[in-house]
Amino acid sequence: MRTMALVPRFLSAYLASPAGQRQVLGRNRQAVRAGLNSNDIHSFIVAAPPTGLQQVFARRVAAVDNLRAINRTALSDFDALFVAPQHRAFRGELRRPFSVLCNRPI
């Protein structure tokens, strides 16, 4: 495998894919030893698109990773905001009638 023509993020995604994993697992001789040597790695066959397309792929993966991080942060913030009212509710400290909370009479 020649890595000069491969964008690292593209190669990483390929090796994590089912096709890449078949190659990794096919060369990992755990009965003898765990892991791969440089000959194993250099023998991988990677169907690589042109470098420009690999770069587009890498940018899209980075954008998705960024969105995942934003969503994790938002979920964490939501969880933190939910805890205080939840504790107050279980302690019976939220005593307003439902009609008042909804701004309409029952």
Image (cartoon, grey):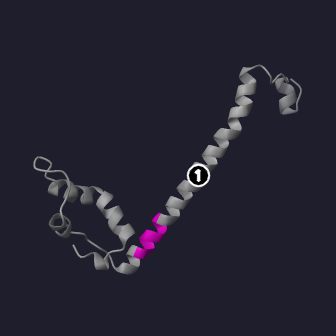
Q: Residue at x 20, y 55 (%)?
A: 35
Where does the magenta region start and end?
A: 55-61
User: Which residue occupies the extreme top position in the image?
Assistant: 92
What residue is shown with label 1? 71
Which one is nearer the viewer's eye here, 83 or 35?
Answer: 35
Dominant secondary structure, magenta: helix
Give the residue drawn at x 26%, y 60%.
20
30 vs 18, left or right, is: left
Q: Residue at x 24, y 69 (%)?
A: 46
Q: Quadrant of residue 79?
A: top right
Q: Quadrant of the C terminus?
A: top right
Specify whether 22 is left or right of 69.
left
The amino acid type of the residue labelled 1 equals Asn
Residue 85 placement (x, y as % from top left) = 74, 31
Position of the N terminus, as image quadrant, is bottom left
Q: Quadrant of residue 11?
A: bottom left
Q: Is residue 3 found inside the magenta-colored segment of the image?
A: no
Relative vertical location of residue 90 with respect to residue 21 in this rendering, above or below: above
Where, by quadrant of the figure, is residue 99 drawn? Answer: top right
